C-alpha cells in the first residue's frame, strides 16, 4: 500500500529502454513514463484511493506487473 509516493528500485539493469505504465482497474492508462534512474519515485497523491496496476516494460515488452493499493 501507498499514500503519496511509490518508489521503484531496479539495480543492475539497463535503464535506457525501461518505462512504466500505471492503469486503473478499468484498464485506462493513467500515466506512462520512462524510468530514468535506479531509484525512481512516482507521485501518487493526485490519484484517488483505489487499486492500480503498475506495469514495468523493457522495449515495450512487459517484464513485471504490480498491484498498487492507494490509501488516503
Image: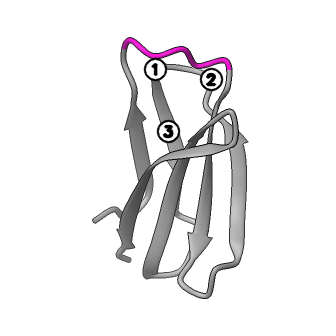
Structural crowding at the residue carrying mark 2, measured as other residues with C-alpha within 10 Å and reported as few (<14), some (14–19) or many (≥20): few
Q: Which is more N-terminal, label 2 or label 3?
A: 2
At 48% from the left edge and 72% from the top edge, which residue is drawn? 52
Residue where numbered disc 1 is placed: 38
Q: Which residue does the image show at 60% across and 70% down from the upper left?
A: 23
Nearer-the-camera pick, 68 or 5? 68
Secondary structure of the residue carrying numbered label 3? strand
Residue under label 2: 36
Q: Residues within 10 Å of mark 3 (few under 14, many from 20)?
A: few
Q: Residue at x 45, y 20 (%)?
A: 38
Q: Residue 20 location, x and y as percent?
A: 60, 46
Residue 58 in the image: state x and y as whole percent.
60, 34
19 sits left or right of 53 in the view: right
Q: CA distance from mark 2 to mark 1?
A: 7 Å
Q: Farthest residue in the front direction?
A: 61
Tell me if residue 19 comes above or below residue 12 in the rendering. Answer: below
Q: Is residue 54 left or right of residue 10?
A: right
Rendered image: mark on residue 41? 3
**Element at label 2:** loop
Examine the rendered structure and indicate whether residue 16 appears above or below residue 21: above
Q: Which residues are magenta?
A: 12-16
Amino acid at each position: 500500500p501507498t499514500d503519496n509516493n511509490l518508489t521503484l528500485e531496479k539495480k543492475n539493469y539497463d535503464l535506457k529502454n525501461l518505462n512504466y505504465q500505471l492503469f486503473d482497474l478499468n484498464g485506462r492508462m493513467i500515466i506512462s513514463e520512462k524510468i530514468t534512474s535506479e531509484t525512481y519515485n512516482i507521485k501518487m497523491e493526485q490519484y484517488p484511493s483505489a487499486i492500480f496496476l503498475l506495469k514495468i516494460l523493457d522495449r515495450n515488452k512487459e517484464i513485471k506487473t504490480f498491484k498498487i493499493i492507494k490509501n488516503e
